[in-house]
Amino acid sequence: MTAQRYLSAAAVTVIAALILSAASTLAHHATTAFYDSSKKVEALGKVTKFVFMNPHAYLYIDAPNASGTIVTWQIELGAPISLKRTGWTPETLQVGTELKVVGAPSRAEGTYGMCCARITRPDGSPVVPGGRVTEERQEEKK
Amino acid sequence: MRATVASAAVLLVAFALTPRLDAQSQPAAPDNPPDFSGIWDGTTRARPVNSDNVPWTKGKNFPEVNERALAYMKIFDEAIAPKYDCQPATPPAIEYDPYMMEVVQWPDRVLFRYEKDDQLRTVWLDGRKPTALDFSLQGFSVGRYEGNALIVETTNFVFDITGFDDYNGIPSSSQKRVRERYWRDGNDLRVTVTVDDPMFLRKPAEYTTRWIPAPKGSKLSAFNCDPESARAAVKFLPARYK
């Protein structure tokens, strides 16, 4: 399989990733110390910033907290160097886009962080249309 | 005359006994060393992602640490981990980072270029030895081919408070020694990584893992670790110390 074909397949995979889970593997640090995976929080709001830098991309959205106050949520994603190979770009999530994000909340009191999030349109539809494909293992060398 | 002959004999004997440093320090490279060159995929397509239980698995190959290590681990605060300031991982952790890696084989050295944190490790095959000035984060690596394998021995690391792995807060000292044995298994590249550190481990620990060939046309990208992004999540840790 050529790199181009691989990227094409991977690009479709990322579409599923955008629907299902933005960062199932963080690979830079353990998530449990930072986020409580036994809980789920939801944020519904507009993108204010999308930082696409290694070792982790971050999505920022302004959305209400549990008491209804608008706060800035910081959603941790994977490493851009890996995300790029599955089709992500710095323009994938545009400022002003309305999103629904559901994920594990940050642990420190008074913070609004999330990881391992599912990102969709507010109605639950995919951010980018498409479907999942199963990646083939690359048997050949170079 | 007799004295002259005796002197000459002494000189000849001395010359014969003088260590031939150049010959000893430059072992001949094999004519056909095993081919490990190319770009290798160490992502989740090749193996499970690293975590606090991978590749060091409790009840299996998790290291047996000594009391000094336990003391460090007890006071360890995740927020102080140097990776949150973009300090790169080191052996034995860097080999398991879930990214691409490139191997270049030259007659006198093997280069391991890691996409994660833009790291380059040089493994010297020409018999050179580290000096007292050669301590560094990635240590000093020497290697040799043994049959179909490449053996890499790395010493001269600097102290690293998370120098064993990225997840368990186990430190490593300047006495850390890491041995890597690379070999081909079909299309895969495999390695057994063995680490010893008498300052922190009761006995050596090891894991074996693999890379798969990267797709044709793959190239490594610059990582350009951003310190702000590296530390951005640390505020989500409940404070351990005031």
Image (tube, grey):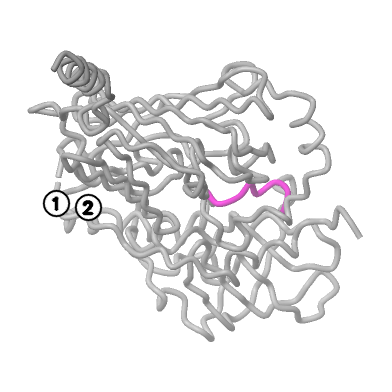
Q: Residues within 10 Å of mark 1 (few under 14, many from 20)?
A: some
> How far from the left and from the top, in percent, is residue A30?
63, 46
Q: Amino acid at mark 1?
A: Thr
Assess whether residue A29 is covered by the magenta stretch. yes
Residue at left offset 52%, top offset 27%: B195
Instruction: Identify the residue position indicated by label 2 in the image.
Output: A6
The chain to which mark 1 is attached is: A
Where, by quadrant of the figure, is residue A48 drawn?
bottom right
Instruction: Identify the residue position indicated by label 1 in the image.
Output: A2
Q: Which mark is residue A91?
A: none
> How far from the left and from the top, in percent, is residue B128?
33, 37
- Asked whether, in this view, residue B78 is left or right of residue B42, the answer is right
Residue at left offset 75%, top offset 76%: A64
Secondary element at tag 1? loop
User: Which range is magenta?
Assistant: A27-34
Residue at left offset 26%, top offset 35%: B125
